[in-house]
Amino acid sequence: QLNMAKKKEAFLKEFKEGPLLFKPTYKFDLYSEVYDTSEKKRKPAWTDRILWKVKNIYEVSSKEGDFPEEENPISVTLSNYISHMSYGISDHKPVTGTFKLEIKPLVSDPLVTLGAEGEWSAEHDVLIRYSAVPEFPSSAWDWIGLFQVTFRHVKDYVTYAWVEDDEIASNRDSKQVYMSASEIPKRGGEFLLCYYSNNLQSIVGISEPFQV
């Protein structure tokens, strides 16, 4: 039925599915691996399926006039597509898929380049130097956060500095921001700096790791 529907319905043609290398997943007697033994004796069928589609963000953007069409930066590969016959609480057997997701960077060079200056310690104020590409849409609400190298989310910062309020020096090529010694972790460790853009709602620059 699914194959017939894919031929008939245009939107389904864009979806992919892995090869069906497992037995039909319906209909089973409960708590068994025996197909339907009731009076109806339904014919075994692959009723439990996983389909996927990757939306090309460049196609969406080009329709809105923002970007030309390019190769989709997101790719999905099916690694595993199996059924689980040991489950018996339903007359269906569950199906799972394992996927590998690859995301190419949207920009080849960072919008902001930044790094820690000098020795970092909780015994004195510390300095950060950064520079941005000319077209970067900076904001007074941008900030630079200090993160442990194992951070997983933008909210995992240890401390942060506002790029405008905490600026102490500026020239054509770069700007300098300070962080107070009281904000630097005394236990030390390996850290990095991230520049967060309020306009882009994203981290747009990450420093090399360094020791505190």
Image (cartoon, helix red, strand yellow):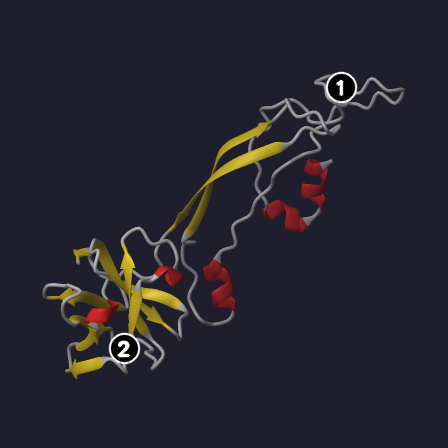
As helix, strand or loop, the secondary structure at mark 2 comes to loop
- Residue 35's label in the rendered image is 1
Distance between mark 2 and mark 1 Cα atoms: 66 Å
Residue 7 in the figure: left or right of residue 193: right
Disc 1 crowd rating (10 Å Cα; few below 14, some 14-19, many 20+) is some
Amino acid found under the numbered disc labelled 1: Tyr
Amino acid found under the numbered disc labelled 2: Val
Residue 2 in the figure: left or right of residue 154: right
Q: Between residue 124 and residue 201, name the one nearer to us.
A: 124
Image position, residue 84 (x, y; %) = 61, 26
Please give the name of the residue rendered at 65% of the width and 51% of the height, measured from the top-left corner.
11
Disc 2 crowd rating (10 Å Cα; few below 14, some 14-19, many 20+) is many
Please give the name of the residue rendered at 54% of the width and 35% of the height, measured from the top-left corner.
97
Residue 58 in the figure: left or right of residue 164: right
Q: Quadrant of the C terminus?
A: bottom left
Residue 118 to residue 148: above or below: below
Q: Between residue 172 and residue 18, name the one nearer to us.
A: 172
Please give the name of the residue rendered at 39% of the width and 62% of the height, measured from the top-left corner.
155
Image position, residue 7 (x, y; %) = 68, 42
Residue furthest right as drawn: 39
- Residue 163's label in the rendered image is 2
